[in-house]
Image (cartoon, coloured by chain):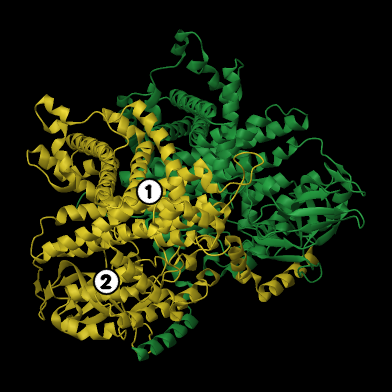
Chain colours: A yellow, B green
């Protein structure tokens, strides 16, 4: 064990194991999680060379092997439910990219949700046995978030009872689906249905793309890998072009909508239930944000405890860089944010399961708010995490830039979260649409409930001037509850500003839609403030559930830091509308500096509590055994550029160059 | 030419060629730059496969070939001055990484600055002819910014008249030098000199590391590549460990300090001149920030003009995404920032040359301010650019994540700028030290000059209360000059706050150094505000130099946007101290939205004016010929994963997997 880390751990004010139980939900959950993780981490089948030293094709090969092994192991561990598979695989293995994964996370669930019983009987057994390997092809080269814009067509031919699939333009080529480039032999393709000469909207079709015996593309199918990306090297994101490609009528997923043999189209009863999958994935991504930021903090804070550099007082030994106020100011607010997001993630998971229960009993009443909340929180947490991972990386100085730190890989594999499953700005505007609706509802005299209920208290909603007095004037900067109130006031004010600006634009413009576009900057800001309030509120409420005094104390400081740091980064929002005074802002800045000092002795224990078992796999700097610098030297020696072949090739080149000069 | 881009260009309010001349400094400069760029871009010797499709070893090989070719070409073009070489090579070829580059940018210049005439005669000819390929080895595994902490020793042995070089610990291993891993056969090594039993501080030594005939490491030398990094794939950043490795006395660079044959140490006369190189490199990096951000904006804005997505009004064709207010709000402030940094970069270059003249005539008076300014502006511009490139990348949605966009490479090759040549936080604190000195000077009754002269006007510096009236109370948000005043007041207030907080800590603590650490968050904020003021001031002043009305008008709007956006992101700073009122802040936000609409028709012409000739090499999305989607499809097909070998290897694997399930 590293001496600095040992010293840090001895100095902590609390037992990190107890905090791990809080994060996992219970000691039993912690036990079970470690059991599963160790099954994977200690299994020789999952061991492989450091991916950083491999070419992309080699990385893909390793990933396919691991991915397939995962299928075998899951059978062995008896994990079958799609949601459980996702939590199981992703839980603490953030950087594991799986080419075969889409078969289980998208192909099979879509078959289950949208396929008839006959279709499930036909395709499920072979896709579970990986005879069929499926993926899900929605996005096109020219079309992302806007589903109505998708161009792929499926035209029904009643004579042969087949659909004719076409990619009519370059922009209509399916683009991005994971596992499509190389791995899959089937895809569920989203296409515009045309039957009896009429366009009937987007529907899902099961499309064989490669021959089962040879794995070669079928005639009429052009399929391949879309090329190297920022990250996800191991994933064969692919393209798919179809030219008059025919599939039987039975390949359209017909649980909801149908095309009869004669071409008659039967509409689905309701579209609302497709909300469910989106809500599930986005709420899962909130948890992913928490895990990725926690992991980055773990590496950066451990390294900052081990790294000695420069001097505070001349002549004294070089201090740990964690003792510099600027380093604390970079890392501790992110640590506090990681904890905030852990609790937001846990809340989203619980809420999803609760509302899913309601839905299965036919109660859809909470779905619109949940939909709006997951959209906004997915964007809010992923943007913050995205910038936070890079801040952690840069806080590790030069070594953060090396793949030895593990941080570049965490970043490049996390950053698509800001774009996929709903581009973040689009997500924020979806939340804004709900906020505007709620505002209008209150304005028209009806109360709203849930996380937006603060809109009921907006002063402008009351006719009597004395009602303004319900707004508190003094914020107690040492009280998480009082700070939550301040965030609530900020959200309320920004929602109201956006609503009023929108109204002004509506009265000046011909169309509501143009007005919406011309207010969208304000609308995004309102959504951000709303999400920030939700995060602060959930963190504050979490404190009340903690029994153990030592844990409560340390979480309370983190919660305060999270709240106060947010104020200091958005001072103007809190000064405007007189939520806080200038002298309070000065106090906030002073209190933040005090909290940095208070949290300092617990910093390493606070990241230990995240309990990442696999940090050793991805990061030399985050390892907690041995000497970080010796580990780093051993790692570097294995660089492919140090191989004899490279030496000889270079030397040959050098001689020819010198002879020319 | 793409139709959308053609339409955009036709609609512009100005001729981009005229703005290019402003950016280059003169029409003649533009002509000369294009001439040189075309020599490279059109030369078949510089053509190569897309680096994104190659393994790291292959990329290294391509880079060595290009790097060597560059040496030949520079001889042909007769470019010999080190500064000119740097400007020439980097000017518009941001992503070109050169393993042999350090020989010219560090080894030879250090030899020239610190070597005696005899030493230059001995080593220059062979290093210019690449018989000797040198690098510069300063940083160690455990030591970055803090030079006194370096551990490598050079112990003089007067009996043999040799220095014995040692890397006494793991942390003392030289780490990071470019070209050290594989390419170089010599290094200038920085080591702690020990002679006659006394430590005499850091000195530079010429150390042969590889045998000239075989290019194999010499006995006593352990050298290699430090492994894969976030970017700079083509660069063999290396490590170097020395064990009782002996070099002749003549290999210490002795222009300034000397060790006599008997071991007597002769001190250098002055250390000030070493400032020069740092100032040069940092001022160069300000220009690099401008170029990298300009390039990212070029790609993102062109793509946003070509990309059609979603709908503003239902039923109408998909609009260009550049028509969404949120997209404009992401990109136009960055475009304005890129222009601001272009002018800051040009100013730094001019100032460096001017002060360099003064120095050569013995006048060092302006050096401290220049040193402080380059440190802070290097940090300020590189942090902003770093986040800005990622914002541009994410504004391109999914395709931004693909290497087809060119943006991931721009980012990974730019981001080390925040860390190397002075870590940004350390840089900001150096600027702060100068600001605190200036503040104290004013406080003690002396005037300061240069960019900090605003400190002379601080109200607290005046005894007469009526003097407070010199501070204006009304900011005209449509006047760049008036906005510059507002930034000045903000800087003055934050410098004063930091100075007062520092004073408070000093009176409470035992040591000045501890007080400094406990105020460092405030100090960094003061430096940031100072640099922001400088950027705003230089942009505003630039406007006065522009004759051409159409160019002046468009730059004025960008300048306003730059100023107002900075206020909206730091509202609290402008509300505090009553620099602005709440209602002015509301006006600022409204005015920003207006400016987005005003700038919209000129956006493409504004990035055209940056005149990047090589965007086609690094980015499919930034190309301005042909159809962006067809180009993208052609690019993707070349992905190495689409090769037949990969197909067969995968298919074999698949069959064995299926047989197991």
Q: Are marks 1 and 2 on the same chain?
A: yes
Task: Determine whether, in the image, residue B295 is placed left or right of residue A474.
Answer: right
Task: Determine whether, in the image, residue A24 is placed left or right of residue A495.
Answer: right
Answer with the quarter of the image where residue A461 lies.
top left
Q: Which of A61/B129 is in front?
A: A61
Whole-percent x and y of residue B539? 51, 32
Whole-percent x and y of residue A72? 35, 83
**Foreground label between 1 and 2:** 1
Q: Which residue is mark 2?
A: A84
Q: Which residue is mark 1?
A: A336
Whole-percent x and y of residue A55? 53, 72
**Residue drawn at (77%, 51%), measured in percent from left and top?**
B108
**Residue drawn at (49%, 37%), measured in percent from left and top?**
B521
Task: Determine whether, in the image, residue B285 is placed left or right of residue B482.
Answer: right
Q: Which of A103/A423 is in front?
A: A103
Q: Which mark sits nearer the N-terminus, 1 or 2?
A: 2
Q: Residues within 10 Å of mark 1 (few under 14, many from 20)?
A: many
């Amino acid at each position: 064990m590293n001496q600095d880390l040992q010293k840090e751990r001895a100095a902590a004010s609390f037992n990190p194991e107890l905090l791990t139980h809080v994060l996992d939900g219970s000691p039993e959950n912690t036990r079970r999680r470690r059991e599963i993780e160790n099954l994977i981490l200690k299994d020789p089948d999952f061991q492989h060379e450091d991916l950083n030293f491999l070419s992309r094709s080699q990385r893909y090969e390793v990933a396919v092997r691991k991915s397939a092994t995962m299928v075998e192991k899951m059978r062995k561990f008896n994990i079958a439910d799609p949601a459980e598979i996702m939590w199981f695989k992703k839980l603490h293995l953030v950087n594991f990219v799986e080419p075969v994964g889409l078969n289980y996370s998208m192909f099979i669930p879509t078959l289950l949700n949208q396929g008839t019983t006959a279709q499930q009987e036909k395709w499920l057994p072979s896709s579970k046995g990986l005879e069929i390997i499926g993926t899900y092809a929605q996005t096109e080269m020219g079309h992302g978030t806007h589903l109505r814009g998708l161009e792929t067509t499926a035209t029904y031919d009643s004579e042969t009872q087949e659909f004719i699939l076409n990619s009519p333009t370059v922009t209509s080529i399916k683009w991005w689906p994971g596992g499509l480039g190389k791995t899959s032999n089937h895809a569920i393709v989203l296409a515009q249905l045309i039957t009896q000469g009429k366009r009937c909207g987007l529907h899902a079709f099961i499309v064989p793309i490669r021959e089962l015996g040879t794995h070669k593309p079928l005639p009429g199918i052009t399929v391949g890998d879309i090329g190297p990306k920022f990250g996800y090297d191991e994933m064969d994101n692919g393209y798919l072009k179809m030219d008059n490609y025919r599939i039987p009528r039975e390949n359209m997923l017909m649980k909801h909508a149908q095309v009869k043999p004669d071409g008659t189209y039967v509409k689905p009863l309701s579209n609302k239930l497709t909300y469910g999958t989106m809500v599930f994935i986005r709420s899962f991504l909130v948890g992913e944000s928490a895990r990725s930021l926690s992991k980055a903090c773990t590496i950066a804070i451990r390294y900052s405890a081990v790294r000695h550099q420069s001097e505070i007082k001349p002549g004294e030994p070089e201090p740990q860089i964690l003792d510099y106020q600027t380093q604390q100011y970079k890392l501790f607010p992110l640590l506090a944010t990681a904890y905030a997001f852990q609790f937001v993630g846990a809340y989203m998971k619980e809420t999803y399961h609760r509302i899913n229960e309601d839905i299965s009993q036919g109660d859809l009443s909470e779905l619109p708010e949940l939909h709006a909340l997951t959209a906004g929180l997915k964007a809010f947490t992923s943007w913050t995490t995205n910038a936070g991972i890079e801040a952690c990386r840069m806080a590790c100085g030069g070594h953060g830039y090396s793949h030895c730190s593990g941080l570049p890989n965490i970043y490049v594999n996390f950053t698509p979260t800001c774009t996929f499953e709903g581009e973040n700005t689009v997500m924020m505007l979806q939340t804004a649409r709900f906020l505007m609706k709620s505002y209008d509802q209150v304005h028209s005299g009806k109360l709203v409930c849930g996380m937006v209920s603060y809109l009921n208290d907006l002063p402008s909603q009351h006719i009597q001037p004395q009602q303004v007095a319900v707004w508190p004037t003094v914020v107690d900067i040492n009280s998480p509850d009082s700070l939550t109130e301040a965030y609530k006031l900020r959200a309320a004010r920004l929602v109201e500003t956006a609503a009023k600006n929108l109204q002004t634009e509506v009265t000046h413009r011909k169309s509501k839609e143009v007005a919406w576009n011309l207010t969208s900057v304000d609308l995004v800001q309102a959504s951000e403030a709303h999400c920030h309030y939700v995060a602060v509120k959930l963190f504050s409420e979490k404190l009340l559930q903690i029994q153990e005094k030592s844990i409560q104390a340390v979480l309370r400081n983190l919660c305060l830091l999270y709240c106060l740091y947010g104020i200091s980064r958005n001072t103007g929002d809190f000064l405007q509308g007189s939520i806080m005074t200038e002298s309070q802002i000065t106090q906030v800045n002073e209190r933040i500096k005090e909290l940095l000092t208070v949290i300092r002795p617990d910093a390493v224990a606070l990241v230990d509590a995240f309990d990442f078992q696999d940090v050793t796999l991805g990061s030399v700097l985050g390892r907690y055994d041995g000497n970080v610098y010796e580990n780093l030297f051993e790692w570097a020696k294995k660089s492919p550029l140090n191989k004899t072949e490279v030496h000889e090739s270079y030397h040959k080149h050098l001689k020819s160059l010198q002879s020319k000069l």
